[in-house]
Image: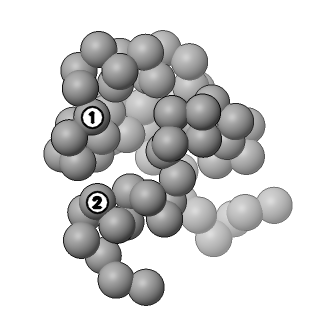
Amino acid sequence: MTQDIPQISRAELARMLQRVGYPANLIDEIAAQVGDPVDHERDREILERYGVTRGHLSELMGASP
């Protein structure tokens, strides 16, 4: 289990994707497929299909390892 990964709401995920430049139609498509709150284990395949991974989002947001 990944208890060290905090869950986020679907709306928070949408805001994060918007902030890093995902187009609105793609954000809507992703949001329609994930649960609320987003569960990293349950929704992993959906998120990865769209290139939404913690590492990729961190890069886009300017975080360093």
- Within 10 Å of disc 2 (Cα), the crowding (few <14, some 14-19, many 20+) is few
Determine which residue is flagged by label 1: 22
The residue lying at 73 percent from left, 46 percent from top is 41
Front position in the image: 19 or 37: 19
The residue lying at 64 percent from left, 47 percent from top is 40
Tag 2: amino acid? Leu
Tag 1: amino acid? Tyr
Determine which residue is flagged by label 2: 60
When asked about the image quadrant of residue 10, the answer is top left
When asked about the image quadrant of residue 34, the answer is top right
Check residue 45 in the rendering and tell me which mark sits there, or answer none: none
Front position in the image: 20 or 40: 20
Which element carries disc 1, helix, strand or loop?
loop
The residue lying at 24 percent from left, 71 percent from top is 62
Question: How far is mark 2 from mark 1, CA to CA?
Answer: 11 Å
Farthest residue in the right direction?
1
Image quarter hosting the C terminus = bottom left
Query: At which x and y percent is residue 22?
Result: 27, 34
